[in-house]
Amino acid sequence: MTRPAILLVGGTDSSGGAGLAADIRAAAAHGVEARLAVTAVTAQTNGMVGTVAPMPPALVAEQIAFALADGRVFAVKIGMLAEAAIVAAVAEALAGFAGPIVLDPVIAASSGGMLLSEEGITGLIERLLPMTTLVTPNLPELSILASRADGRLAAGDPAPVSQTGLRGKTEAGPHSHATPRDAALVRNLFAAGAGAVLVKGGHETGTEALDVLHRRDGGPPRRFATPRLDAMLRGTGCMLATAIACRLAAGNGLETACGAAKEYVRGLLAGASAEPG
Ligand code: PLP
């Protein structure tokens, strides 16, 4: 039987904590071969983003075309995209890909540095959301994408993203998951074409880390709760989305893939919190 491979589209992080290095670790842990399309090289520490150097869009497109050429890529995970021209190149290069596409809508690093331009956010909504099987926003990303998608649908003039709005914990309160407000925001992503939406509550406060899967075909949202662990680990969003893509490549359904991926990340966090500080 052909061993499945996945394609990881994203940026590098010089600290090694997030981005493609984290994605490759997650794919290796699932026994899945990883192919790469590098969108940007970043100089980062855990506390700051320095230079962000986007790759030429044609080079990103060529990496994707070559990675897909032998037909062994069963799923694609997309992370950092840096700018609108790369978003467009990725959308075009993936246009003929028939397998699942998981989009982690990376807008900023947890240090606050921006990893996607304003035009890139608009491009992501217009070009990539309609191609996704699943999009995995955290709560700040959900609110930015939903308001932009809504503004676009209403032909409004969206406010620019502030870095502080994306940094650190959100203050939405202990029961802010799958609230009517979240459900309304998720509906905006569905209106923009998203296949399914996994809202990640990992940056929230409270005793549970709760992720909620919303499906396009309706039905009650599926909740995935794990006890909140007091661990600082970067790249958890990258690894969660990659783990989901690996599971989808292996033929798992969306709910099974999300549940297993959440469990995988919980294990990583448990390991990190057990390390001597
Ligand atoms: N750097 C790159 C290249 C990424 O792809 C990501 C992905 O989310 C990040 C940084 C952000 O990671 P973190 O939220 O752990 O800072």
Image (cartoon, rainbow, N blue to C red):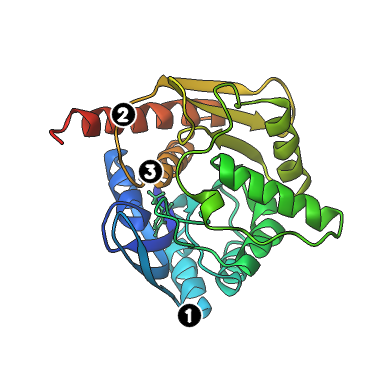
Which residue lies under the disc numbered 2?
230
Is 5 rendered above or below residue 206?
below
Q: Which residue is mark 1?
A: 56
Q: Nearer the viewer, residue 22 or 176?
A: 176
Camera-side residue of 226 and 175: 175
Which residue: 38% across, 24% down? Answer: 228
Q: Which mark is residue 43?
A: none
Q: Between disc 3 and disc 2, whose residue precedes?
A: 2
Q: CA separation, marks 1 and 2?
A: 39 Å
Q: Quadrant location of residue 94? A: bottom right
Q: Disc 1, disc 3: CB below 8 Å?
A: no
- Element assignment for label 3: helix
Question: Image quadrant of ligand 1?
Answer: bottom left
Relative placement, left or right, of 4 versus 217 is left
Amino acid at dot 1: Pro
**Residue designated by label 3:** 239
Answer with mark 1 or mark 2, whichever residue precedes in sequence: 1
Above-or-below relation of 53 to 138: below
Q: Picture quarter containing residue 86?
A: bottom right
Q: Position of residue 129 (x, y in %)?
A: 66, 52
Kind of residue at disc 3: Met
Q: Is mark 1 within 8 Å of ligand 1?
A: no
Q: Is residue 248 above or below residue 145?
A: above
Label 2 secondary element: loop
Mark 1: few/some/many CA within 10 Å (<14, 14-19, 20+): some
Q: Report the mark closest to the observer, 3 or 2.
A: 2
> Can residue 105 be seen at all in this image of the molecule?
no
The x, y position of residue 106, in whole percent, is 51, 54
Q: Where the C terminus falls, by quadrant?
A: top left
Please give the name of the residue rendered at 40% of the width and 63% of the height, measured from the top-left corner: 11
